[in-house]
Amino acid sequence: MEKSLDLKTLFHPRSVALIGVSTEQTKLSGRPFRFFREFGYTGSVYPVNPKYQEIAGVPCYANLSDIPGDVDLAVITLPASAVPGTLAECGAKGVRAAAIISSGFAEVGGEGVHLQEELKRVASEYGIALCGPNCSGFIYFPERVTATFSVGLDGGFPELGPAAFISQSGALSSYILGAAKERALGFRYWITTGNECVLSFTDYLKYLLEDPEVRLVLGYLEDARDGQAFQIAARRALLLDKPLIIMKVGRSEAGAKASVSHTGSLAGADEVYQAVFSQNGILRAESLDELFDLAVMSQASRRPRGNRVQILTNSGAAGILLADVGSEWGLEFSDLSSATKEALKKIMPPFATIANPMDLTAEIVARPGLLKGAAELILADPNVDNLVIFLGIMPGAHEKLATDIAHVARATDKLIMVTWFPLPLPEVRQILIQADVPLFPEPARGIRALGKMAQYVATREKALARQPPPARKEPDSGSEVGKILARAKNQGRNALTEVEAKSLLNACGLAVPRGGLARNAAEARSLANAIGGPVAMKASSPDLLHKTEAGIIRLALKSAEEVERAFEEIVEKAREWNPEARLDGVLVEEMIGGETREVIVGARQDLRFGPIVTFGLGGIFVEAIRDFAVWPAPLTLEEARDMIRKIRGYRILTAFRGRPAADVEALAQVICQVGQLACQWQEQIAELEINPLFVLPEGAGVIVGDALVALR
C-alpha cells in the first residue's frame, strides 16, 4: 500500500467514527468527541457505542456498519481484546485510517503482543493507515482534526503555525502542546506514535516534510526503528531547509551492542545516534526548554549568515556570559571595522567602550535612539554576521526599545536575536515576535540556540556542496576478500586470524608489515633473518583476538635466540590463556618504528543504522581515554578529515616540537576504505578493527599494525 495516500486520509478525513465513545466527556473515551465538536471540525462525526442512542444531541450508532455514510477515520477507545475485530470491521466498511488510543498491546507483553500482531495483519490486509495503538492520538490543526484525548487542549485550541511535532511519548507530548502558546510556537501537526504497529516516527516525518506549510519538525525520540529510512528522511529535511529538532533520550551503554572489538565497545548507542544527527544536521535538544529554544530560532525567517556575532548589552556581566557560552558553541566575537568604530564614537557616550561585547550602559534608556543607531551601524559592518542584544529591567523604556529593534530587524537580512531577562510584558514581546525576532528568556539559552543554528547552517551548506560518497560496491565472492571470508565461514569460525585479516586489508590496498607465519621456532628464526631487523611476534588464532590481555605478543626482538625463545613463550602463554584455542602458529613481522603515530580505525554494523566507522588515537588505553569520533559509512574524504580533526588529541597528528606532521591525508583515505569495506561486505563482516594503524610522516603513508575481523 502507498502510505503517503493513507496518511492523507488520516489527516484529512471528511468523516470520523468515534468507536467506544462515552457520554462522560471528562473520560478518555469521551474527550475526542468533545474536542471535535468544541473546536469546529467541519466534517461528519459519528459516535459508536451500543449503550447510547444519542450523545449531546448527536445520533449514536450501535455498530460501525450502521453508519449510513462513508467513514474515513476511526478513533478507537475500546478494551484491547475488542480492538482487532473492530479494526477488521473498519476495513470491511472501507475505513482507511485509524487512531487506536487503547492500551494493552505489545507494551504489556504476553497476550498483548499477539493482539498487536493481529492489528498489524488486519491493517495490512485492508490497507489501513494506523496510528498507535497505545497512543494519545494526533491533531491536524488547519482542519481541527482532534483525534486525541490530550490534556494539552484543555486550555483551548493552540495557535496554528509552521511547526510539526512527532513524539514517541504520549503524556510528555500533551505538556509540550500546552506549553507551546507561551513560547509563541504554533503547530500544524501534533502526532503521538504509540507502539508504531504500522506507521512509524519516520513514516510521519517523511509525510510532513512534503507539506509546503511545514517549516520545522520537532520530535521526541526513543528509538528510530528503521535507521536507514530515518537517515534518508533526515537528509531530505536538511536539503529542504526544514530544521529537524529532536529530543533523543536513552543514552545508557545498556543500549549498545555487545562487541568483541575496542571500536565496537567505544561506539555505544548514543554515540551512533549523535553521529547520525551531526551528519544530517539534526538539532539535538538536551532539555524541553532547549526543544522550544531551537524551535523559536528555527521558525525565524532569517538564518545565521555565519558564526561571527556582535553583542549589544546594557549589562557587562550579561555580555561576558553570552561570549563565554557562545564560544563553547563555535561562535566568534570578531572586531568591528575601523570605519564602524569611528561612526559609533559619534553616537556613543564618552565613557562607553567600543568592543565586543559592547555595553551601552544605562544610557540605553536616557538617550532614546542609542540602541537603534548602534544596531544599524553594526549590522552594516561586513565583519558581523549576527547581532545579539541583551536587555534587562528598564522601567518605561521597554516598548520603545522593542519597537526600535523591530524597526531595525525589518530593514536587514542579518539575524537579530534578543535575550530579555526577565521577560517584559506580553504586549512588548509581541512587538518582537511580529517582527520575526527570536526572543529568549535567558542569555545562555539564547546564545546556545544561535550557536547550534549556525552549526546547522554550516552543515547544510556542506551537504549542498558535498560530493556524494562512493556508491556501495557489490560483494564479489570470487575476489581475494570474498575467498578469505568464505573460507573462514565454511570452517564455522566467527573471526579471522590476524594473518587473514591483514591479507584481507592488503587485498583492499592497505600496506601491511613484511613477515609471515611460523609454525615452529626454526621457521620463526628463518623469517626474522629474512626480515633483517627487529621483529614483532604474536600468536595467530581466531580464538585469541585480544593479544595484549593474553600476553601473547613480543616486541623488538633482534637476535635468533630471542626469536626462538619468544616463539616458545608465546605458544605456552596461548595454551594457558585458552587451552581450547585453535593456534595456527606465530606471526613474525618487521617492527614499525621511527616517527609514527598509533591510531585506531574500525567499523561495526549498528543494529539501527548499519555500518558505522570509529576513529581515535590507538594503543591499549583507547577505551580508558575514550578520545574518538564516530561517523556513518560510507564516508566522503572530507567527512573522514572532519573525523580526524574532531578528536581532542588531533594536535598529536600535526607537526609540533620538532616532530613532522603525520600523513593525515593517507589516514583519511584508510578511514574511507574501512567504511567502504564495511558497507560492501555488510552481510559478512560484523566488526573490523585496525589497532594500531601506524601513521607515518606526511607523504609516507600508513601501515597496518594489527587487525581484527569478526564475522556475522
Image: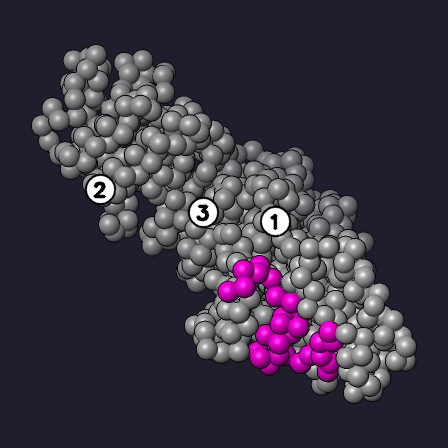
Q: Amino acid at mark 3?
A: Arg
**Residue at 50% of width from left, 69% of height from top?**
486
**Dot 2: few (<14), some (14–19), or many (≥20) neighbours within 10 Å?**
few
Label drawn at residue 258:
1
Q: Amino acid at mark 2?
A: Glu
Task: Tell whether label 1 touches label 2 (CB within 8 Å).
Answer: no
What whole-number distance in Å separates the C-alpha atoms at marks 2 and 1? 37 Å
**Residue at 84% of width from left, 84% of height from top?**
533
SS type, badge 3:
loop
For residue 279, side relative to residue 531 (left or right): left
Q: Position of residue 188 (x, y in %)?
A: 37, 42
Q: Amino acid at mark 1?
A: Ala
Residue 5 is a magenta residue: no
State which mark lies toward you, 1 or 3.
Answer: 1
Q: Position of residue 158 (x, y in %)?
A: 40, 33
Task: Tell whether label 3 touches label 2 (CB within 8 Å).
Answer: no
Identify which residue, 532 or 600, lies in the foreground: 532
**Residue at 41% of width from left, 36% of height from top?**
195
SS type, badge 1:
loop
State which mark lies toward you, 2 or 3.
Answer: 2
What's the magenta region?
Answer: 490-519
Task: Name which of mark 1 and mark 3 comes first in the sequence.
Answer: 3
For residue 283, side relative to residue 516 (left or right): left
Label drawn at residue 225:
3
What whole-number distance in Å separates the C-alpha atoms at marks 1 and 3? 19 Å
For residue 134, side relative to residue 284 (left or right): left
For residue 497, side relative to residue 22 (left or right): right
**Dot 1: few (<14), some (14–19), or many (≥20) neighbours within 10 Å?**
few
State which mark lies toward you, 2 or 1.
Answer: 1
Q: Is residue 583 above or below residue 558?
A: above
**Dot 3: few (<14), some (14–19), or many (≥20) neighbours within 10 Å?**
some
Q: Which residue is mark 2?
A: 125
